[in-house]
Each structure stands twice: as C-alpha cells, then as structure tokens.
Amino acid sequence: MDSTQAVAAFAALGQEYRLSIVRALVTAGPDGLAAGVLAGEVGVSSTNLSFHVKELSRAGLIQSRRDGRSIIYSATYPALSDLIAFLMRDCCQGRPEVCTPAVEALVACCTPTGDVAHA
C-alpha cells in the first residue's frame, strides 16, 4: 500500500458510521452481512448505508456480492491488513518495545484463546 491508497482508506474511515460499518463487517467474518442487517447494526437507513458503503468500496476496504435478492457486504481483509502494515512498517526503528503492544493486540485477535503469552 502506498501513501495515496492509505490516505484514501483513512479518509473513508474518517466518519463514524463508516468506521462502524467496517468494524461490523470485520466482526461478521468473511461471510459478511446482508445490507439490511448491516444497516440495522450500525443504525443507518438503507439510503445512508448505500452512501457510506460506496465510499468504503471505492477505498477498497469492503466489497459486495449479490446473493439472490440481497446484497451482501464483507470486509476486504487483504486491504485492511495492508493498511495496518502501512502504519506499522517503520514502527520499531530498532526498538521492538514500541510495537509490542500493537503486535500483541493483533495476536490476541487472531488466536482462539486470545493468549498472547507465546507472542
């Protein structure tokens, strides 16, 4: 991810509903959520949801697919991972203790028990 892509991603996330949409989709997992369910979870109307998901899709952070009559939205995990990597790329600068809390938080979300003792 380059700086231009990161700026677009952060701009898309820089609104409360959009951040809530991404968080809801990350929590939902790869199967995603139907548009109506997603709108209900974040507390927006269908019209407002369309506006917000368009911006998040344009930034490459979410994707959509049709399932019958429903539109299913899901997080674009590679793009979100790239954004995290972009932020952390030069984090330590020879001082790993600077990045340890962030790394431990990522490990905790990716292990079944949340145990970071082995990290």
Image: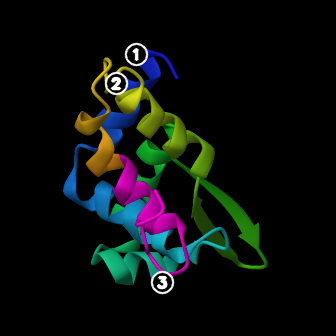
Residue lying at 36% horizontally and 81% vertically, measured from the top left = 41
Callout 2 amino acid? Val
Q: What number is the disc on residue 37?
A: 3
The amino acid type found where label 3 is placed reads Val
Image height of 83 relative to 43, above or below? above
> Residue drawn at (37%, 31%), measured in percent from left and top?
88
Q: Which segment is the magenta one?
A: 103-119
Mark 1 in CB contact with mark 2 (< 8 angstroms)? yes
Give the x, y percent position of residue 63.
61, 53
Q: Is residue 87 above or below residue 108?
A: above
Disc 1: CA contacts within 10 A as few (<14), some (14-19) or many (>=20): few
Q: Secondary structure at mark 1?
A: helix
Question: N-terminal of the two: label 2 or label 3?
Answer: 2
According to the image, what is the colour scheme of the structure?
Answer: rainbow
* Nearer the observer, 3 or 11: 3
Q: Nearer the viewer, mark 3 or mark 1?
A: 1
Which numbered tag is attached to residue 3? Answer: 1
User: What crowding class fits label 3: few (fewer than 14 Cα within 10 Å), some (14-19), or many (20 or more)?
Assistant: few
Q: Secondary structure at mark 2?
A: helix
Q: Would residue 113 be visible to someone looking at this image? A: yes
